[in-house]
Structures are given as structure tokens and as C-alpha cells.
Image (spheres, grey):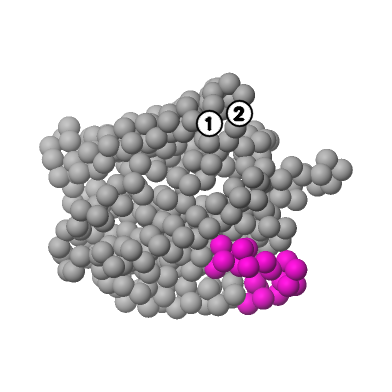
Amino acid sequence: MTGSLRRVWLLGTIALTVGAVAVTVALAPAGDAPPGRALQWLLFVGSSVHVAATGWFFSVPEVRRHAAAHPGRYVWAPIGLVVGTAAVAAVLPERLFIWPLLAFFAWQFFHFQKQNLGLAALAGVAHGAGSVRPRERLAIVAAGGAGIAGLLVRPDLLQLAVDLRTGWLFPVAGAAFVLAAGAGMVVLRERPPAARPVQYVAVYLISLLFFGPVFLFDSPYAAVAGLTIAHGYQYLLIVGLVAGAPRPGLGPVVSLAVLVNVALLGGLALNTASHLHGGGIAARAVFGAYTGLLMAHFVVDAGLWRLRDAFPRRFLTERLPYLLPRPDPAGDPMASPARSA
């Protein structure tokens, strides 16, 4: 069973990541045409549904207790983000709200790359290769930073109608991405063969090259939407495995049913709010609150998946022992993905 679940996670992560990008490129509309129904549904699940799925964690009593013990991250920061962005969106006209949105997108795509780094660490630990090494980590972070820079200097790829006159920097960001990706492949080759299993190599390369579409396509959907869908589906897969883990009390079927309902109902609400940026003050405030909820998702997830902390390490190790084997008590408890996740 352990080996089967490990393969489900590994093959699912690879297939969902590569498949999301490939399908999105194939379905991307030409020019300024709106996306077709199939791409809309893929985006709905990969964006709104995946964000709402974070709410499932609060159906778990031990997570609620942990959140109550750390209200700064799990209560006050989310409330502050939602209220603050609602107020800013209500006050600023749509044309000026673009500037806070650029900062939001930078944070969002940094969040994406942090997840990629965690996935590579999990793949290494789960398959006996050890966690991501410092220079491998640096290459992933640098490649992600170059991808984020490319998006910020070409806001048309984010479908933001603002001319920053920074398009000339896009090739510079592209060159930085190529250099970071090349360096990542070089340091990967420095691992001895026994520490370079194909499973780790596959997930590491996916993480390293994740932002490649930004520099390959001019269509916002082909360049960016595939990244959003891939990130969301990666997340839904691993959260589904956490929710479906056998536990005393609430059975896995009920737990998965709660996850599906929370994710779908919350996703519908988020999706509705995401289209209100062009309305009146009240509608813009709702859109701002929606943006704040997305940022709250970044904050909450950064805490719940921070494996250097005791609670997330214990909580996730108990539910994903095939990815996070318990460390040897006689050894270093941090010789795990904790330093990279």
C-alpha cells in the first residue's frame, strides 16, 4: 500500500503538471478571445477550488487547536488581509488597483515556486535521495525569480492593462531563467548516481523548469494559465492524500467528502467574487476581499506545510508516511525535507 500511494503521488504530480501545461497550451484562445468552456473549467478547479480546499484543514480538530495557539498567522493575518484588500479595492479605482495587483501576483508566483521546491524535497526524501541540496535549491529559487521578473515586466501576460515600458527587460529575465536552469542541471549532475533516482530527477526538473512557458508563449493563457492549473492540481492531489489517510474517528470517506464539498462550494464563491473588479464600490470591495482570501491561503499554507516546525512535521508525517518517513530518533530530526519544504 505504501509503495502504491507513493507512486500515485509521484506519477500524479508529474502527469498533472506536464498535462496541465500541455492541455492549456492546446486550448489557449488566439489573441484576445475568451477561453473556451473546457479551459474555464480547468482554471476554476486549478484556481478557486484549490484555494478553497485549504478550508478543509480547519475541519481537523488538531489543526484548529494549532491555529488557536498561533492566532497571528491563522486568525489575525487572514482577517487583516481580507479587510485591508477590501478597503483598498473599494477606495482605489480599477486603473490604480493594478499596482497592488502586481505585488499580489509577485507573491502568488513566489508561492507557486515554494510549492515546487517542497515537491522536489518530498520526491528526494521519499525515494532515498535526501532533500534538495543548497545549490539545487538556489537554482530553483533563481529560476522562479526570473520567471516572476518576466511576468512583472510584461504585465500583458497577466492580463493587466498597463504599459510600464519595461518590455525591453523581458529578454534579460529570459536569459536569467536559462542561466538558472542550466546551473540547476549542472548541480544535479554532481549528485552521485545513487542519490539521483529518476523519480527525484523528474520532479526536480519540473520544479526547475516550471516557469519556462512564460518565455515561450505570447498568449497569457499559454504562458500563465497552465502554471496556475498545474499548481492547483498538484495541491489538490497532495491535500486529497492527506484527507484520505486512515485516521481514528472521522473515516477517510467522510473526510474526503468534506474536502470535496468545502473545495467546490468555496470555489464557487471565490470564482464569483473574482469577476467583480469592474463594478461599483461594493463589488470592488468584494473583489478586494477575494484577493485577500487568496493571500490568506498563502499565509495559512506556509504555516501548515512548514516542516521545520514540530506540528506540521508531526501532522503530515502521520498522514503521509510514504513521503515523509519518520526520522531516526538517534539521528538528526531535521535531516528531512524540513529544510527545503
Labels 2 and 1: the sequence-earlier one: 2
Position of residue 5 relative to residue 312, above or below, is below
Which element type, helix, strand or loop, lies under badge 2?
Answer: loop
Residue shown at the point (69%, 68%) measured from the top left: 196
Residue shown at the point (68%, 57%) measured from the top left: 127
| Coordinates of residue 76 in the picture (x, y in percent) | 45, 28
**What's the amino acid at mark 2?**
Arg
Q: Is residue 206 visible?
A: yes
| Coordinates of residue 82 in the picture (x, y in percent) | 35, 33
Mark pair 2, 1: CA separation: 7 Å
Q: Which residue is mark 2?
A: 247
| Coordinates of residue 80 in the picture (x, y in percent) | 39, 31
The magenta stretch spans residue 19: no
Q: Which residue is mark 1?
A: 252
Residues tagged 2 and 1 counted as in contact (Cβ below 8 A): yes
The magenta stretch spans residue 187: yes
Between residues 31 and 298, which one lies in front from this camera angle?
31
Q: In this image, 320 relative to 259: left or right?
A: right
| Coordinates of residue 126 in the picture (x, y in percent) | 67, 53
Q: Quadrant of residue 86?
A: top left
Residue shown at the point (29%, 68%) measured from the top left: 26
Please give the label number shown on residue 87.
Answer: none
Numbered range of the magenta stretch:
186-205
Position of residue 331 relative to residue 215, above or below, is above
